[in-house]
Image: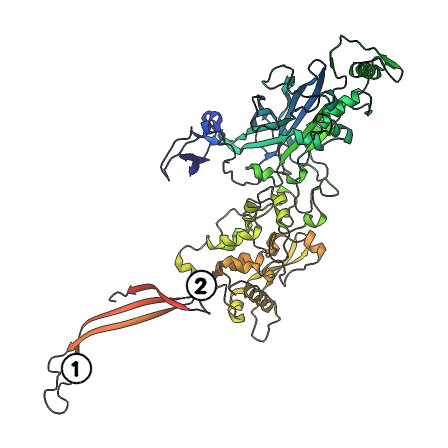
Amino acid sequence: KPLLRRDGDDVYICNWTNITSFTRDDENRGTLDLDIKAQRDLIPVLPPNPVQGSEFNAYNVPWVIGAKKGLPNFNEMSLQSVFEITRKLQIDKRLRSTNQLLFVGVSNAVAVEAWNSYTNWFPLGVNIVARNDMEVGLAISNRFQSSVNGMFGSSRVYATAATNLIQAWEGRGAVNNPNRVAFQVPIYTNFASFVPAVFTKNGLMQTNLNRGWLDAASGGGGDLPVPVIRLYVTNRLQFYMLARNDAGVTNVIDYVHLRVVSERDISRELDEEGSNTERDLWDSNRAANAGDIPRGVLRQILVSLGTPGVPDFVWDNYGRLEAAGARTKEQAIANFMAFYYGRDATFRGYQGKFSSTNLVMQVPFSPTRRLLEYRTWQANDPLVHYMAGDLEYLEQGDGIRNLSPLERIPSLENENLRRLNDRYQPWGGNPSSAATRGGTTARNFKLELKDPGVRFSDDWEFPTNKFPNVGWLGRVHRGTPWQTIYMKANEIGQGRGGGSGREWREWTGNSSRRDAALTFPQQDFKLFDLFTAALSDNATAGQMSVNQDGLAAWSAILSGVIALTNTAPGESTPRIITPAGVDQPNSAVGRIVEGINSDRNREPKKAFERVGDVLKAEELSVRSPFLNLSDVQAQQAMTDALYERIPQQIMGSLRGSDKPRFVVYSYGQRLKPAERSLVTSGPLFGLCTNYQVTAEVAVRSVIQVDGAPNRPQVSVESFNLLPAD
């Protein structure tokens, strides 16, 4: 669990604490919304790197849960929000004005789901607790004002549920017919955030929300402001699952707290969703030669005058089902025509009587719109669900659709609850869908997106012991859907043969182009510079540089390595790699070395900068000379254990790029003439025939060459006096 500290307005994770059992204090501890300053300020101000920090939880700052095979997981959160609006108009002949009232209602449904994605039942009793804090805000403002102008309503609803599974939790069941009992839904509730009410400029039942002239002939030129409507829905979810082991200790098997926000521009939706007739009645553009009245308001008046007509699903006779044959709509039109034109009127045989004392009248037709938003946050990979971005289902679009006034609101139960997520796309695609939703057949078998051969959670294999070498990092399940630490050459989002950055964003749910690029699979190559399985520095003395281009050197690294050849699904044959002589460039080792050298020469500096860059060579993995690469084999028989078999074994024998260096050993002595060593006469007068050593020194210097090969510059990297022995 992360511990938090605050420095001014910034919040940091300063430390971690291990939750070995779950207590009531943990259960009741507050969870903060860091977007709210008053809650952010509850975190104490502490110096950097303290031993302890605040134990407050924070939405979207997850606990780190170990990936353990066999545990059920949080799976989905779904939200359905229905906005309903009715516009009523009143004509006042005395003021030559239009009064407008907006009747608004908002209802919501929310559901939370967990799933046992494994075949086996989970053997322990589980307590699932889900708490959702839904805050709904409705803002109505004048289009020409920057503020909400005081027209604001808000509602807050808390939903808490606990599901106790005293007995074991059933597994996923058949491939094409998942067991519904494997899906647990602790929260599934409907509630009205705003009952239908009138919203005016001070939020009360009041007329004259907007005023303006009916038409230019009445005196001309008015200003009927158009309201701008926005709906804000914030869900703050705390979800955790507890299991009690045989020793009576309550362990956390999953813990999620998410903050997900929906912000809707209702005015835009009214303009864009629904039939042409429905959209025209809410057109906010100004009508020329009609006192600048909005076109939607003008059309409402014209429909009330009988032209144009609208379908029954837009305006039907009152009590049609109770009184067959009643024509209340035609009578209402005739009555309004008499009021509007100031004379008796007839419409389709119905009479409207004019009364000179009737100066105020409500327009008989009041358009109603219902707009539904369905959004779901779904796990693609059951083990990756701790951040809202992990669950974002970008391919569902905005989830907005129009409902006719007579249409029943669909149930969340009929969407994606208690069945495989639409976003669930393991190797081979969604097993319950003939045509994989949201993707092409090519995506079903894409190495860059998912682990080959991993069709269900049961197919994961996690290493349980210490790694024999750094290449075993490829067996670790990392934080990308259906991906281990990536050691294959295929690229996505950039470079040769890769897909688009958009595809990667949709796959991961990461809508940020920049952030998504940081999680491209090939970014994993950098990890091999950070980790080692060596017990000491001495254990790395025999490593070879990845920039070595000699066939003999690579033959020494590769020879004796046991490669695997795929034969049938679940079966493979071991092959010992034999060394290649200089006269065997077309051997398996020769082809691998040729591929490595070719990829190195494509690098900007004609050299690999990191040890992991050698993985760009396809011949080490996805184009290994030991693999059967037919489509059938690639789809049915291949696994990471096959693709990454060679890198897994040799990465511990390689080191990254080295700048050219050479070592200089220098030895010096300080001398003085020895006793009776000087010639004192003759032609060799002054010659010293013997010296006595008075001091000596030995130095080891490492000289580094920068800028090679074009502009080499030397510098002393290290300078050491050697000890006397």
Residue 622 visible at all: yes
* The disc label shown at residue 658, or none: 2
**In the rendered structure, are the residues bearing label 1 and label 2 in contact, judged by CB atoms less than 8 Å apart?**
no
Where is residue 64? Give x, y as percent.
Answer: 50, 38
Q: Check disc 2: other Cα within 10 Å, few if <14, some if 14-19, many if 20+.
A: some
- Give the residue furthest to the right: 349
The correct choice, above or below, for 492 with respect to 1 in the image is: below
Q: Check disc 1: other Cα within 10 Å, few if <14, some if 14-19, many if 20+.
A: few
The correct choice, above or below, for 68 with respect to 233 in the image is: below
Front residue of 125/671: it is 671
Q: Quadrant of residue 339?
A: top right
Q: Amino acid at mark 2?
A: Asp
Mark 1–mark 2 Cα distance, whole angstroms, equals 47 Å
- Give the residue furthest to the top: 357
- Closer to the chain start, of discs 1 and 2, is 2
* The disc label shown at residue 218, or none: none
In the picture, the quarter occupied by the C terminus is: bottom left
Front residue of 665/577: it is 665
Is 130 left or right of 698, judged from the image as shown? right
The secondary element bearing badge 1 is classed as loop
The correct choice, above or below, for 308 with respect to 7 in the image is: above
Residue at 71 percent of width and 43 percent of height: 436
The secondary element bearing badge 2 is classed as loop
Q: Quadrant of residue 361?
A: top right
Q: Amino acid at mark 1?
A: Asn
Where is residue 182? Give x, y as percent.
Answer: 65, 32
For disc 1, the marked residue is 690
The correct choice, above or below, for 644 with respect to 213 in the image is: below
Where is residue 346? Give x, y as percent.
Answer: 87, 15
